[in-house]
Image (cartoon, rainbow, N blue to C red):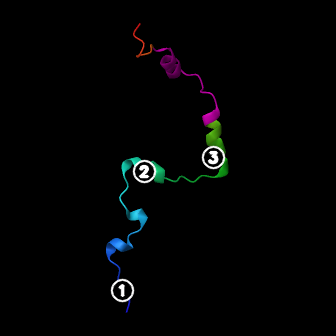
Amino acid sequence: MKTKLPDKARKGISDAPIEPKELLDRTLITVTAAAYAQFVAQLDAPPKPNERLRKTMNAPLPWKNE
């Protein structure tokens, strides 16, 4: 005769509650090698000049009240 396990014993780790701060540690995004290479290239590329970036870079520093 088989013994039936209680519900709590049958639950896997994926059923355990996840704290919000742990969510990123458990997120897996799969992409192709080409897509990953393109993503890394975009991260490594210098930012393209634009008006919003220029305004941000020329704004007064809030921690320097001189």
Q: Nearer the viewer, residue 37 or 26?
A: 26
| Label 3 vs label 1, nearer the camera | 1
Q: Is residue 58 above or below residue 41?
A: above
Part of the protein shown in magenta: 43-59
Quadrant of the snapshot with the N terminus: bottom left
**Mark 2 in CB contact with mark 3 (< 8 angstroms):** no
Magenta stretch: includes residue 15: no
**Mark 3 in CB contact with mark 1 (< 8 angstroms):** no
Q: Is residue 5 above or below residue 20?
A: below
Which residue position holds label 1?
Answer: 3
Q: Is residue 64 above or below residue 12?
A: above
3D distance between C-alphas at marks 1 and 2? 35 Å
Which residue position holds label 3?
Answer: 36
Q: Earlier in the sequence, mark 3 or mark 1?
A: 1
Quadrant of the snapshot with the C terminus: top left
Which residue position holds label 2?
Answer: 23
**Identity of the amino acid at label 1?**
Thr
Q: Nearer the viewer, residue 3 or 20?
A: 3
